[in-house]
C-alpha cells in the first residue's frame, strides 16, 4: 500500500526541499520505491539537491497537460535506482497545475510506488492547495523562529480546513547551544504552541550546505548530525519507534575558542 | 560600570522566552479570525445550553470576539426574557 506525503511549511527557506530530498533518498536506501514530485513550479530546485539537473527531458506540466505519459518525465537517481524525480517546469507558474490533475496523477503513481513525496511551494495560495490535494499525510516543516512557527500554525489551520487529519511536524535547523542558553525556542515550547505530533528534530548542520553544493543529500553521510536526524525520520515513517536524538553540545574547548574568536 | 558587571555576571533576559511569549499572543489573535460559519455554530450551541435554564431574546443577542493588546475575549450580550422554574433537580 503506497503512502502520499506532502512536505509543506508556509514560510519559504525553512528546508522543505532539503527535507524532501533527504527523506526520498533515505527511503530509497531502504529499498523502497519512491517518487519525488516537485510542485514548486517556476522555482524548481529539487533536481539540484539530488544532482539530477542535467537529466531533465520533460516535466510535471508536460504530464498534466497530456503531452507525455508520466513515465517519460521521471528521472531515475544515479545511485539509488528505486528513487525517481518528477521535476516541474521552470518557465510556467503555479496556476499551470490544478488539484484535480495532481490527484489524478498520484492515483496513477500509487500503482507503481511505495512512497510519493510531494514538495510543496511556499505560501498558502493555489500552489499550496494543489500540492496538498492528493496527500494522505502532511509533514509540516518549521524552524525554532517566531515567523516560521507562526506560519506553521497557519498552515496547520489550512490543512485542517482542507480536511487533512494526519499532520506531522518536523523542526529543522535547531541550534542546540542556543537552546541551551535560552536564546532559541525549544521543542517543548513548539510542541506546546502547535500541539501536533512531532516526527523529526533536525539540528542545524553545515554538512547540509556542503552536501547541497555537491547534489548529495546529507542523509547518506554517517558523520552528519542532520543526516542522522533524517534517518530517524525515515525510520519513523516506516513505523519504527525511534527515540529523538540527543544533540552534541559544544564542549568547554569549543566555547573557549569562540571566546577568543577562533 | 554596573551595566558591564551585569553583562558579565548577571543573567540577561533570555530571548527564547520572549519569542515564546510573543508567539503565544500573536497566535491567539491569528486563530481568533474565525469564519462567520464557525461563529454561527458557536452561537447556536450557546443558545442551546442557555435555553435549558432561561428564555432568551435571540434577536437581540450579540456574540463576538474582542481583541485586546495581549488577549482575546469572547464577549456575549444575551438579553434574558424569562427565567425558567428551578425544578429542584439538585
Image (cartoon, helix red, strand yellow):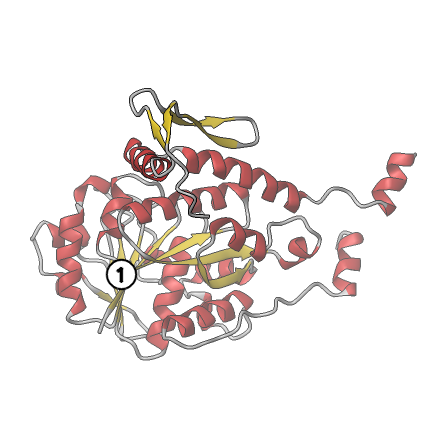
* Vertical placement of residue A227 versus A260, above or below: below
**x 30%, y 31%: residue:** B36
Image-based side of A22 in relation to B70, left or right: left
Image-based side of A113 in relation to B82, left or right: left
Q: Is residue A12 visible?
A: no
In what quadrant of the picture does the N terminus of chain A appear? Answer: bottom left
**x 65%, y 45%: residue:** B17
Q: How many marks?
A: 1
**x 70%, y 63%: residue:** A250
In what quadrant of the picture does the C terminus of chain A appear? Answer: bottom right
Image-based side of A183 in relation to B72, left or right: right
Q: Quadrant of residue A251?
A: bottom right
Image-based side of A213 in relation to A250, left or right: left
Residue under circle 1? A136
* Vertical placement of residue A76 versus B90, above or below: below
Provide the chain ID for the residue under circle 1: A
Q: Position of residue A179 (x, y in %)?
A: 65, 55
Amino acid at each position: 500500500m503506497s503512502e502520499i506525503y506532502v512536505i509543506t511549511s508556509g514560510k519559504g527557506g525553512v528546508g522543505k526541499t532539503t527535507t524532501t530530498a533527504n527523506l526520498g533518498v533515505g527511503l530509497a536506501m531502504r529499498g523502497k520505491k519512491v517518487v519525488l514530485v516537485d510542485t514548486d513550479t517556476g522555482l524548481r530546485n529539487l533536481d539540484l539537491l539530488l544532482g539530477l539537473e542535467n537529466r531533465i527531458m520533460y516535466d510535471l506540466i508536460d504530464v498534466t497537460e497530456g503531452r507525455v505519459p508520466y513515465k517519460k518525465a521521471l528521472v531515475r537517481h544515479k545511485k539509488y535506482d528505486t528513487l525517481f524525480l518528477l521535476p516541474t517546469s521552470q518557465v510556467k507558474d503555479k496556476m499551470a497545475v490544478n488539484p484535480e490533475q495532481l490527484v489524478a496523477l498520484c492515483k496513477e503513481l500509487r500503482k507503481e510506488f511505495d512512497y510519493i513525496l510531494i514538495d510543496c511551494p511556499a505560501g498558502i495560495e493555489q500552489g499550496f492547495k494543489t500540492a496538498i490535494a492528493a496527500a494522505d499525510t502532511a509533514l509540516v516543516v518549521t524552524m525554532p523562529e517566531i515567523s516560521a512557527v507562526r506560519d506553521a500554525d497557519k498552515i496547520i489551520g489550512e490543512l485542517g480546513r482542507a480536511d487533512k487529519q494526519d499532520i506531522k511536524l518536523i523542526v529543522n535547523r535547531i541550534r542546540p547551544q542556543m537552546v541551551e542558553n535560552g536564546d532559541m525556542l525549544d521543542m517543548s515550547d513548539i510542541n506546546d504552541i502547535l500541539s501536533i505530533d512531532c516526527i523529526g528534530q533536525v539540528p542545524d548542520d553545515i554538512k547540509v550546505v556542503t552536501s547541497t553544493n555537491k547534489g548529495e543529500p546529507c542523509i547518506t553521510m554517517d558523520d552528519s548530525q542532520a543526516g542522522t536526524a533524517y534517518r530517524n525520520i525515515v525510520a519513523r515513517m516506516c513505523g519504527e519507534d525511534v527515540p529523538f536524538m540527543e544533540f552534541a553540545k559544544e564542549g568547554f574547548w569549543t566555547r573557549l575558542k569562540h571566546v577568543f574568536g577562533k | 560600570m554596573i551595566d558591564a558587571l551585569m553583562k558579565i555576571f548577571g543573567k540577561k533576559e533570555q530571548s527564547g522566552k520572549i519569542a515564546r511569549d510573543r508567539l503565544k499572543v500573536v497566535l491567539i489573535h491569528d486563530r481568533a479570525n474565525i469564519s462567520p460559519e464557525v461563529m454561527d455554530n458557536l452561537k447556536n450551541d450557546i443558545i442551546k445550553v442557555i435555553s435549558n435554564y432561561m428564555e432568551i431574546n435571540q434577536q437581540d443577542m450579540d456574540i463576538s470576539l474582542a481583541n485586546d493588546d495581549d488577549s482575546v475575549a469572547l464577549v456575549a450580550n444575551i438579553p434574558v426574557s424569562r427565567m425558567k422554574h428551578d425544578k429542584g433537580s439538585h
